[in-house]
Image: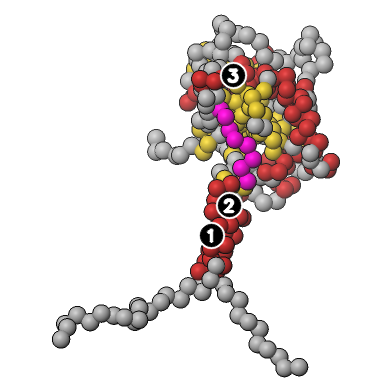
Amino acid sequence: MARRAAPEINAGSMADIAFLLLIFFLVTTTMDVDTGITRKLPPPVENPDEDVDVKERNVLKILVNNKDMLMVDGKRSDVRQLKDKAKDFMALHPDNPDYPEVAPKFIEELGREVPSSKGVISLKNDRGTSYEMYIQVQNELARAFNEMKDEKSVELFGVKYSQLVDETKMDIINALVPVRISEAEPEDIGGGS
Amino acid sequence: MSRFKTKKGKGGASINTSSLPDIIFMLLFFFMVSTTMREVTVRVKQQMPEATEIQKLDKKSLVSFIYIGEPKNAKLYGTNSRIQLNDVFADVDDIPEFIAKERESRDEADRKFLTTSLKVDGSTKMGIVTDVKQELRKSGAFKINYSTRKKVKRNR
């Protein structure tokens, strides 16, 4: 049987079809990358009356009222100073009663004990605090901890924490600089919302 | 004798358009890869606060969103901050059910990695956010993300 040459398909409308698909995807999709501050919520307390005993010197109290004013350890403060205050508080100050206690902590990956601060940052906000302010405070605290991680990482491994690739190294830094931000159980402070 | 010759049947050289579909397909694939499907219509104002210490949320399929803010249609819904779950306005009490549904729709192995992203308008008061957080704690969704925009670094 004689073979006939396959008839050529007209591809002129291919561009139109592709355009149609392109426009469909342009309209229905978004390109924004979601970014944000990741936090872990504590599990709900079983006994609300039962208070965990934490020594006064181990806690840095941060209060934000409904006028978005900041109080750090009983004194009025500013968001711009918060990072340095938090860093100073979490840094190791052995034998100084104004700063949190220092206790040795065994780090498995390092195989030895290292001094570690027992400090906790306690954040308490009012129902009337604006979300903007809350994020600013959270951001400053995150910055404090990230800077401490970077410093520790440079000291131990010579590179910043964000540039670490090895996961065990990351674990070591995370064990050495634990992010200890405690958020108080909500209650109304400083005038309603 | 005419000075102006009419060009008849002698059209300009046509441009070869046979590669046009390829170009368009290339664009199409770029958009298909780099974008994500818009799933919900946001009905609340979303002016996110800015922050510097932000992390990227990867694994979009393991993120459920809670939108909080003033309704865009103030005439209909007033100006009080509202919670939006999926496509509808909801109350704080609806959150456990929402979380349970979100969890059920995911693969069993992935459930513990489920993150809740709080997309909250900057002018919202913390009261409603705190209520939502308490509700999330009760329903066991501990991993949360405060959605923020990246702050443009300025020289201080």
Say which chain tag 2 marks. A
Q: Nearer the viewer, residue A37 or B2?
A: B2
- Quarter of the figure that contains the N terminus of chain B: bottom left
Q: Amino acid at mark 3?
A: Met
Residue A60 found in image quarter: top right
Query: Looking at the image, is mark 2 or mark 3 nearer the viewer?
Result: 2
**Mark number for residue A19?**
1
Left or right, A40 with respect to A35, comes to: right
Say which chain tag 3 marks. B
Circle nearer the N terminus (1, 2): 1
Is residue A65 shown to the viewer in this render? no
Left or right, A80 with respect to B62, comes to: left
Q: Amino acid at mark 2?
A: Phe
- Of helix, strand and loop, which one carries label 1? helix
Q: Which residue is disc 3 drawn over?
A: B126
Query: Looking at the image, is mark 1 or mark 3 nearer the viewer?
Result: 1
Q: Amino acid at mark 1?
A: Phe
Farthest front residue?
B1
Is most of the magenta stretch helix, strand or loop? loop
Is residue A6 shown to the viewer in this render? yes
Left or right, A131 with respect to B142, comes to: left
Can you give x and y, in whole percent of width and height, for residue A69 in the image? 50, 15
For marks 2 and 3, give the CA distance: 37 Å
Rendered position, B129 above or below A105: above
Residue B143 found in image quarter: top right
Discs 2 and 3 carry the same chain letter:
no
Discs 1 and 2 carry the same chain letter:
yes
Residue at 16% across / 82% down in the picture? B3
Mark 2 surroundings: few (<14), some (14-19) or many (≥20) residues within 10 A: some
For marks 1 and 3, give the CA distance: 46 Å
Q: Nearer the viewer, residue A7 or B54?
A: A7
For marks 1 and 2, give the CA distance: 10 Å
